[in-house]
Amino acid sequence: MSRLVIIPTYNEKENIEAIISAVMNLPIEFHVLVIDDGSPDGTAEIVKRLMESTCKDKLFIVERSGKQGLGTAYICGFKWAIEHGYDYVFEMDADFSHNPQDLLKLYDACANGGADVAIGSRYITGVNVVNWPMGRVLMSYFASKYVRTVLGVDIRDTTAGFMCYTRRVLETIELDKIRFKGYAFQIEMKFTAYKIGFRICEVPIIFVNRQLGTSKMSGGIFSEALLGVIRLKLSSWFRKYPQI
């Protein structure tokens, strides 16, 4: 069963080689697709050097011009994964906030546990976040609770960005109808999978704040997510979702 990890990047030269190495050294084989949005720090050059040396036929890159948003990066990666026949497709950050070892747990939940979508969840067993300021922890936790209430989904970590999708999910979701580009994209993907009827499970992880590089998080990103939830709920009343 082929497995692809999609890693969107913008200025991740401090992390990219190490995160690729960590994924490649897992006990089962994962391929990596980097979606780079024109990083001026040379992130793409590092990836291409690895493609020519230690990671031939397992590491790939799509280079885009300028920052086009997290959501569009993943949609691009999902389409690439479908085109190249991958069975399990993962979302993952480049900065080690997601532990590469947890890819194994997400994969097991889908391959052996019957899930169609597995979420690396910070909140399914409490609050498992390390080195975040308390204000950001509270904002993230209550944002997820707000989303869960408004959308009526039983998902504790609705904004999580550490995921495994089966190929069937990505082929069924109408990817061109996913509208949000920031962190609201994560909510929209989960809600769409839920509305279609896919089985979603949450796998407990520990989220660790990045130590190298610069965070891309901002208040505007959270605002988009919070306001976008209402739009998402309203539009769902009039949209006909594919059924499985």
Image (cartoon, grey):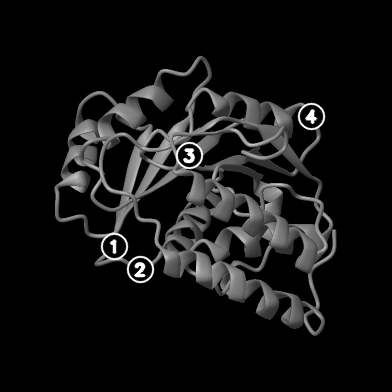
- Three-letter amino acid code at the position of disc 4: Gly
Q: CA distance from mark 4 to mark 3?
A: 19 Å
Mark 3 or mark 2: name the one nearer the start of the chain.
3
Label 3 Cα neighbours within 10 Å, binned few <14 / some 14-19 / many ≥20: many
Mark 1 or mark 3: name the one nearer the start of the chain.
3
Q: What residue is at 60 percent from the left and 67 percent from the top?
A: 175
**Whether label 3 touches label 2, CB < 8 Å:** no
Snapshot quadrant of residue 211: top left
User: According to the image, label 2 marks what residue?
Assistant: 68
User: According to the image, label 4 marks what residue?
Assistant: 113
- Three-letter amino acid code at the position of disc 2: Gln
Q: What residue is at 76 percent from the left and 40 percent from the top?
A: 201
Single out the mark in the foreground, 3 or 2. 2
User: According to the image, label 1 marks what residue?
Assistant: 64
Single out the mark in the foreground, 2 or 1. 2
Camera-side residue of 204 and 7: 204
Q: CA distance from mark 1 to mark 3?
A: 18 Å
Mark 1 or mark 4: name the one nearer the start of the chain.
1
User: According to the image, label 3 marks what residue?
Assistant: 5
**Whether label 2 touches label 1, CB < 8 Å:** yes
Label 4 SS: loop
- Three-letter amino acid code at the position of disc 1: Arg
